[in-house]
Image (cartoon, rainbow, N blue to C red):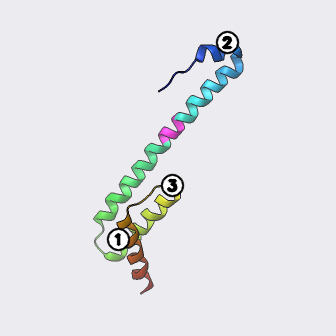
Amino acid sequence: MGISHHKEVIALNPVLGSFLILLTSVILMVFVIINLFVSAILMTFGKERKSFKTQKEAALMDMLLLKLSSLLGIQQHQNTCTVEMEAARTYRT
């Protein structure tokens, strides 16, 4: 991952150095766990979107996936945007 000098940090200030190393480790693990949950949710939405039979339910699932992705800052392919526009047209009629 990289060069880290834990012994030097702890030698300079034992309390603050230990806290800094522990805090950094915890924050990195939280990001890893959040990434796992987000990927599981997005995979589930993708599978459910493909399994819907009616067009209204599929359009709703496409819109939900697009909103969730935009909320999390994930870029979608160009064809998903056209599906979302078609879904909006379907709900207007």
Residue on which disc 1 sits: 58
Residue at 36 percent across and 76 percent down: it is: 56
Q: Amino acid at mark 1?
A: Ala
Q: Nearer the viewer, mark 3 or mark 1?
A: 3
User: In terms of secondary structure, what is the magenta stretch mainly?
Assistant: helix
Question: Which numbered dot is residue 72?
Answer: 3
Q: CA distance from mark 2 to mark 1?
A: 59 Å
Answer with left or right where residue 10 lies relative to residue 92.
Answer: right
The local crowd at label 1, few if under 14, some if 14 to 19, many if 20 or more residues have their Cα within 10 Å, is some
Q: Amino acid at mark 2?
A: Ala
Q: CA distance from mark 3 to mark 1?
A: 21 Å
Quadrant of res 48: bottom left
Residue on which disc 2 sits: 11
Residue at 54 percent across and 34 percent down: it is: 28
Q: Amino acid at mark 3?
A: Leu
Q: Is residue 23 above or below residue 79?
A: above
Magenta span covers which residues? 29-33
Magenta run includes residue 31 = yes
